[in-house]
Image (cartoon, rainbow, N blue to C red):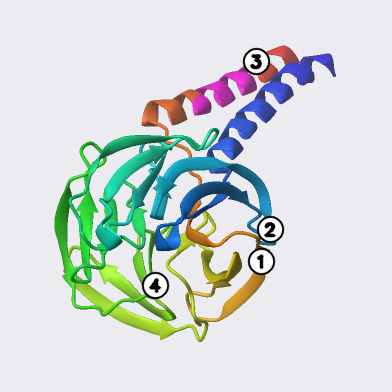
Amino acid sequence: MKTLRLPLVFLFGVFAMLIRVEAQTLYGITGAGQSSSILYQVNSTTGAIVSTIGNTGLVGITAMRFNPADGLLYAVTTGDRGVTSNLYRINTTTAQPTLIGATGLTGGVPDMAFSSSGTLYAWNENGDSLITISTTTGGVTPAGISGIDTYQTGLAFSPGGTLYLKSDSDFYSLNVGASSSTFLFTSGQSLSNMLAFNNAGVAYSGLRTGSATDLFTINMTTGDATLLGRAGAPFSALAFSTSAIPEPSTYAAIAGMGVLALAVYRRRRS
């Protein structure tokens, strides 16, 4: 029995490392209407606030998302009402922002989404068009999709790589390569400017109601909206955490450790 203990503990450690890669936390932030942007951790099952992380010291954050390329949280302040629109990184422990650069946009940025390769897409309400934002400079480039009259816009990639756009209760899929959009359904539930997917492919959105937010999941096949609960803060954006995508060498090392543990086990048994 003693010869089994070390290999088994080792293998459990390997499995724990793999599970941690998939672990996620839901974050919400305030900022609609040029209000203070306060970062929260949210229970993704009940919608309740788990903790108040802190005040960013900024106003008007209406879009935020984790970058799968580096695992960090990025956010954009809206350019409405004469306020300069900027791109920031947000520390998820202290809520402190780091300025990356000005986007140069004069319209609002209601939501944004990272592709699996780390390209940052956003929706520009000045002209209703899809753009990309440089995570190095904050500079903006047109992404070739426009013509959708949007309101309370949400933008998010599913785990399968499909880019979805939400305008109030209307949902679309966007094909960046073909510069085209496809209307999918109307959910029947009015929703504010937020859309996010977890690793399981479940879509989340919310409706600001005064000083609170009703959190919903959206069935992306039927359009049905299911109320999870109410958070005691008026969120302007939602984002699920993501670990930085490991290099292939990291996966190889994990697999190698598993093989080594099995080899030790077999040798001791023989």
Magenta: main secondary structure: helix
Q: Can you identify the residue that label 4 sits on?
A: 152
Q: Which residues are magenta?
A: 254-264
Marks 3 & 2, CB-CB < 8 Å contact: no
Q: Secondary structure at mark 4?
A: loop
- Horizontal and vertical percent for residue 205? 51, 67
Using the image, determine if residue 176 lies above or below residue 265: below
* Residue closest to the eye, 140 or 105: 105
Question: Which quadrant is home to the C terminus?
Answer: top right
In the picture, residue 67 is in which quadrant?
top left
Q: Can you identify the residue that label 1 sits on?
A: 230
Instruction: Please say whether residue 1 is visible from this viewpoint.
Output: yes
Which residue type does callout 3 highlight?
Val
- Horizontal and vertical percent for residue 162? 35, 64
Q: Which mark is residue 264?
A: 3
- Image point 55% across, 33% down: which residue? 93
Which callout, 3 or 4, points to the residue nearer the camera?
Answer: 4
In the picture, residue 158 is in which quadrant?
bottom left
Which residue type does callout 4 highlight?
Gln
- Horizontal and vertical percent for residue 7? 70, 20
- Image point 59% across, 36% down: which residue? 20
Q: Which mark is residue 48?
A: 2
